[in-house]
Amino acid sequence: MGRVDMQDAFMQTDPAEASPLMGDPMSFAAGEVDAAAACLGAGLPEAAETHLRLAGLSYHREEEALAHLQAAWDAAPGHAAVYIGLYRFYFYKNRLREALDVARDCLKKAAKDNGLAEDWRAVKPADADFGSFDAILPRFFLFTLKGYGYLQLRLGQLDEGRAAIEKLMELDPSDKLGGKVLLEVLARLGHEEED
């Protein structure tokens, strides 16, 4: 099985299921924010919120949308809601390397906000309340880790992607975030390569 076939396998995975920072593509285009983003939106300046909404409304006009995303960043640098907006924009535009850059930065932010090790590989289940779906900051870390792993897989970095998803499963053994589906796709790829 070639590199393109591996990428195709992950492209066939439902993006909303595989990449949790995503949500519904139409919700981004409409400028709506999902429940997790709303919880993480606490303290978001009105100007940033306005620019995020305008970025969603101008999604089909790339330069305009990016200008609004930059203005949102300028108004609220490092805010989780802005990271989510940037990630969604790049992901839906199929600018996966840029989405991965955002995911990396977001993962560092989520680790810092949770008091975790900066290197996600060093995070242990007891380091935060990963088992509670109501614990917003630990859940944001898990969502970000899953998005990071998914993008690595989409970009053909299977070892890094597998490691991230395996860490996700270690931190979320009940699979509330659905990391298992990505490991199943990887397992199928391995079986097909053996044939």
Image (cartoon, rainbow, N blue to C red):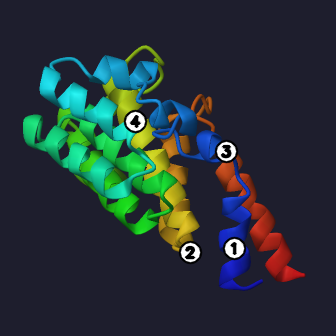
Q: Which class describes the residues within 10 Å of circle 2: few (<14), some (14-19), or many (20+)?
A: some
Question: Up-down: is 149 above or below 173?
Answer: below
Q: Earlier in the sequence, mark 2 or mark 4?
A: 4
Q: Which residue is mark 3?
A: 180
Q: Which residue ends up furthest to the right in the rendered image? A: 195
Give the residue drawn at x 56%, y 35%.
Answer: 26
Q: Which residue is mark 4?
A: 57
Give the residue drawn at x 51%, y 30%.
Answer: 27
Q: Which residue is mark 1?
A: 6
Indicate the secondary structure of the residue bearing disc 2: loop
Q: Earlier in the sequence, mark 1 or mark 4?
A: 1
Query: How far apart are the alpha carbons under marks 2 and 3?
Result: 18 Å
What amino acid type should be assigned to the residue bearing mark 3?
Lys
What amino acid type should be assigned to the residue bearing mark 1?
Met
Q: Looking at the picture, how far across and down is residue 60, in whole percent?
A: 45, 50
What amino acid type should be assigned to the residue bearing mark 2?
Gly
Given this view, does label 2 or label 3 mark the residue nearer the observer?
Answer: 2
Query: How far apart are the alpha carbons under marks 3 and 4?
Result: 34 Å
